Amino acid sequence: MLRAQPSVDGWLREVAAARPRAAVGAAVAVPAPYLFRAAKALAGSTLLWGAQDVSWDEEGAHTGEVSASMLAEAGAGLCIVGHSERRLRFHETDAQVAAKALRLVSAGIRPLVCVGELAVERRDGRAEAVVAAQVDALLVGLKGETAGLMLAYEPIWAIGTGVAASPQDAEAMHAVIRARLGPLAGKVPVLYGGSVSADNAGEFMAVRNVDGVLVGGGSLRAGSFLAICDAAERCAGV
């Protein structure tokens, strides 16, 4: 996410000082220039931290790209791939998203893979088929290497629009995703993302089949991020 925001160092210090409970599995993904700042600020913290993207290539003439091994060297524990903005603006394919995820798994980094449908696909009744195909392509591309895999359902029409899916829509799509995961269904966390805020995060996390939330603009203020962590703690009963 690229936008004017408060000091990254200040955000990291405030969140680190609050020490969200490890039981809720809170994590933060920062732009690549801030990886080493996150490593320093969150050393000893309960938060898992990592990056917002990675290259599907491990080496070669790819000026400006960040490889999985670079992220591992920085100490990143997770990385987001397949975000709707990457798929739409940079035309990333399902195969490329899967290749990125495989690079991360091979480097010992947890991939958080985003899937979701366009508004027109939902209107045409194709939302479930589109998301199911994305999950299927991911599993094929991972070739059985699924250690640490996480998924996030982010309906593209809800990204940055302020219009979130209903909890019922989220529950239904998460059930579809778990069905596609098959034997992995109980092992792969599936999050909801799309106009999540401190006001509605608890509502989504209370829904069956939803393991947590992926938050974009709603987390740019440390106070909002921590409020979402508090909501997760209440849902988890800790």
Image (cartoon, rainbow, N blue to C red):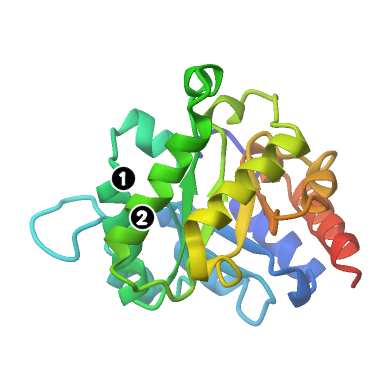
What is the crowding at mark 2: few (fewer than 14 residues within 10 Å), some, or many (at least 20)?
many
Quarter of the rendering containing residue 106: bottom left
Q: Tag 1's secondary structure? A: helix
Q: Tag 2's secondary structure? A: helix
Which residue is labeled 2 in the image?
Answer: 138
* The C terminus - image quarter: bottom right
Residue 106, which numbered label?
none
Is 219 left, or right, of 156 in this rendering? right
* Marks 2,1: beta carbons within 8 A: yes
Which residue is labeled 1 in the image?
Answer: 94
Q: Residue at x 79, y 50 (%)?
A: 207
- In the displayed structure, 49 sits above or below 95; it is below
Q: Nearer the viewer, residue 69 or 187?
A: 187
Q: Position of residue 96 (x, y in %)?
A: 26, 49
Q: Position of residue 86 (x, y in %)?
A: 38, 38
- In the displayed structure, 5 sits above or below 36; it is above
Q: CA distance from mark 2 to mark 1?
A: 7 Å
Q: Nearer the viewer, residue 127 or 80?
A: 127
- In the displayed structure, 9 sits above or below 164; it is below
Amino acid carrying label 2: it is Leu
Amino acid carrying label 1: it is Asp
Q: Nearer the viewer, residue 180 or 119?
A: 180
Regarding residue 82, the answer to whether it shows in the image is: no
Q: Position of residue 235 (x, y in %)?
A: 87, 60
Which badge, 2 or 1, is on the more N-terminal residue? Answer: 1
Is 168 left, or right, of 105 in this rendering? right
Q: Residue at x 61, y 42 (%)?
A: 173
